[in-house]
């Protein structure tokens, strides 16, 4: 990393380290319409992005811009309440800035959530899909540019981005709580357009079960920085051949809200096992 960028990042990390009164090992990134997780948190401190030096500020409806430190089921966590999307016009470096900060703060486990369209014909709106693997279809990569070997390898291994261990815990907890879980491959695209019927079909043929406009860049940085990653999609609309829904942002937010209690329960139950 260039010295200037390193200094910028370090300034953010230093600020947060001074403000933090807990020392979380887990970071959670909340997707569209999934902000309700904060309701089950014992909040210790909520810091608006605008108060954090060099932190980006988010623009989308349904995305708040605060970093929240607190506890979920006795476990210290930091929650990114409002992520940065590539389609908003941010460069990849900004999209993944929070994950670089998390790694710098010593976070070991990264939990990513998102709303996604489901292509797998066995999926229904409101399902939760654990992400087993991803396809980076952004046409770019957050690691393009000079590499700082102190942070991670030039050619990062991507053979198990989404931790098998964490997926196993999720399946166990879901079974205990009678939460129906799907598992599949997420394809990350730039957006902001929802897919045409032919695009949904093409992505399914490529091997993806769900499509969305986030998560992949963040997971790449998480893997690069050696974090253990757990990610899931809430299926908010279907792009199944022959039954493509007319997705709108409002419907996506509404469907995410409906599935939210399941997701909250799952995360709550998983926490002590992490
Ligand atoms: N496509 C892309 N992103 C999405 C979708 C979709 O169908 N639903 C929610 N986010």
Image (cartoon, rainbow, N blue to C red):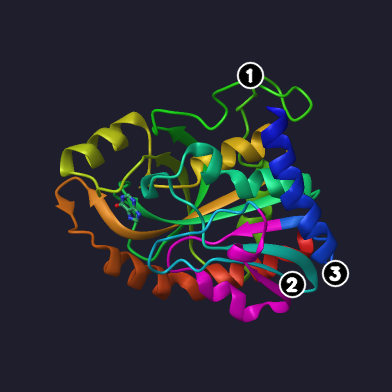
Q: Nearer the viewer, residue 60 or 171?
A: 60
Residue 228 visible in the shown view? no
| Region rendered in magenta | 27-53
**At which x and y percent is residue 50?**
59, 64
Graded by Cα atoms within 10 Å as few (under 14), some (14 to 19) or many (20 or more), the crowding at tag 2 reads: many
Which quadrant of the figure has residue 4? top right
Q: Secondary structure at mark 3?
A: loop
Disc number placed over residue 21 in the picture, else none: 3
- Residue at 72% in and 36% down: 6
**Which residue is labeled 2 in the image?**
70
Q: Secondary structure at mark 1?
A: loop
Task: Tell me which label, 3 or 1, sits earlier in the chain.
Answer: 3
| Left or right: where 194 falls relative to 236 | left
Q: State the CA–CA distance, disc 2 to disc 1.
A: 35 Å
**At which x and y percent is residue 55?**
61, 54
Residue 123 visible in the shown view? yes
Q: Quadrant of the N terminus?
A: top right
Q: Is mark 1 within 8 Å of ligand 1?
A: no
């Amino acid at each position: 990393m260039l010295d200037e960028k390193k200094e910028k990042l370090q300034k953010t990390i230093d600020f947060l380290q001074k403000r933090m009164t807990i020392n979380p090992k887990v970071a959670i990134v909340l997707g569209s319409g999934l902000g309700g997780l904060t309701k089950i948190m014992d909040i210790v401190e909520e810091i608006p992005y605008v108060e954090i030096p060099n932190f980006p500020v988010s623009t989308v409806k349904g995305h708040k811009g605060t970093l929240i430190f607190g506890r979920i089921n006795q476990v210290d966590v930091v929650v990114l309440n409002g992520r940065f999307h590539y389609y908003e016009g941010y460069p990849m470096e900004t999209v993944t800035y929070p994950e670089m900060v998390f790694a710098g703060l010593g976070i070991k486990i990264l939990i990513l959530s998102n709303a996604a369209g489901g292509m797998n014909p066995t999926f229904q709106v409101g399902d939760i899909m654990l992400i087993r693997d991803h396809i980076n279809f952004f046409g770019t990569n957050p690691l393009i540019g000079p590499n700082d070997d102190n942070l991670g390898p030039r050619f990062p291994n991507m053979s198990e981005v989404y931790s098998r261990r964490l997926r196993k815990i999720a399946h166990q907890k879901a079974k205990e709580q009678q939460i129906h879980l799907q598992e599949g491959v997420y394809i990350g695209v730039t957006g902001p357009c929802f897919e045409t019927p032919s695009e949904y079909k093409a992505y399914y043929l490529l091997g993806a079960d769900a499509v969305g406009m986030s998560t992949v860049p963040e997971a790449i940085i998480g893997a690069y920085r050696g974090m253990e990653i757990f990610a899931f999609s809430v299926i908010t609309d279907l792009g199944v051949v022959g039954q493509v829904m007319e997705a709108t942002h409002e419907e996506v937010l509404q469907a995410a809200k409906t599935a939210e209690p399941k997701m909250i329960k799952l995360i709550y139950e998983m926490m002590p096992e992490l």
